[in-house]
Image (tube, rainbow, N blue to C red):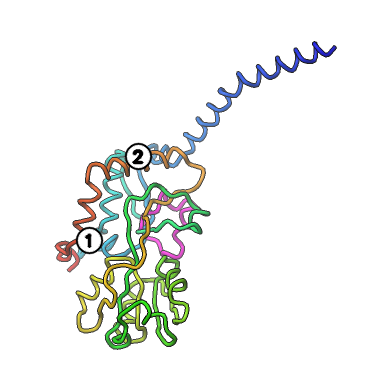
Amino acid sequence: MGKAILKTVSTLLLVVVFCLPAAAQNVMSELNKESVISKVIERNKLRVGFSTFVPWAMKDKNGNFIGFEIDVMKELAKDLGVEIEFVPTTWSGIIPALLSDKFDVIIGGMSVTTQRNLKVNFTDPYDYTGIGILASLKKGGNIHSLEDVNKDGVIIVARIGSTPAAAAKEYFPKAEIRLFEKETQCVQELMTGRAAVMLASAPLPAFKAYEFPKKLFVPVKGTFTKEPIAFALRKGDPDTLNVLNNWIRIKHDSGWLTARKDYWFEGKQWESLLK
């Protein structure tokens, strides 16, 4: 009796072992069909969610979107052989919009954070950035260090849902923090003297100080954080993640990403396109 049972169990195990590869192939086949990259190729269009940040993404004088990340996504679409559709989205709602399939991928100077990663998957970094400080000569003329920012009575402004907003709470708990939907609103708070300091991803602080030298200045040179920047995707899509990761590696190794980053961040020859 024992030998008969053992023989039956052994036979069942063999059936399971031989069936597993076929079942796995079926699962992978279904994942591939449902992947974002497959749907992009099928519809011949890549839908990109983003929010405007100078010089990541902005409108030129003709109303067209230009900037470092606009170049990046146009290059990706070209290499995929598909058309591109840019979907401007408020920063505070950009992850919910991705999850509800309003677009296929987020690009927008999005830093990789643990809290964001709980909701979306990130590719390998295609860039790195950091947070800088922009100050008002009228309201923050006595600010010359990080310690000067972290004081009672100092008003800090930042964009809602951004890593600068999170950094304001972490690094400057004694200051008062006010959040706005757009970076232009934050800059306006400094220009009018309603706030002393704005936290923003580089190179915006340096650009704005150069643009308005009589009203704004950079009290602390450089950045006080370093953050990886990546594409954000919906979870459960290994094929799309693989394609984008390898595309990023190719563009890093070829020098293309560095060249485009240098054009948009190391000079302002593109400024004539805006006016």
Q: What residue type is labelled 1?
A: Phe
- Secondary structure of the residue carrying numbered label 2: helix
Instruction: Report whether residue 96 is seen.
Output: no
Which residue position is annotated with label 2? 246
Q: Does the magenta stretch include residue 34?
A: no
Q: Does the magenta stretch include residue 89?
A: yes
- Secondary structure of the residue carrying numbered label 1: helix
> Any mark on residue 265, and which?
1
Q: Nearer the viewer, residue 165 or 81?
A: 165
Answer yes or no: do the residues labelled 2 and 1 have beta carbons within 8 Å?
Answer: no
- Relative vertical location of residue 236 with respect to residue 27 in this rendering, above or below: below
Q: Which residue is drawn at 43% across and 69% down?
A: 167
Q: Which amino acid does label 2 sit on?
A: Asn
**Which residue range is magenta in the image?**
87-108
Q: Residue at x 70, y 14 (%)?
A: 11
Give the percent coordinates (x, y) of residue 182. 37, 71
- Relative vertical location of residue 243 with respect to residue 116 in this rendering, above or below: above
Q: Nearer the viewer, residue 75 or 150?
A: 150
- Relative vertical location of residue 136 with respect to residue 230 in this rendering, above or below: below
N-term mark: 2 or 1: 2
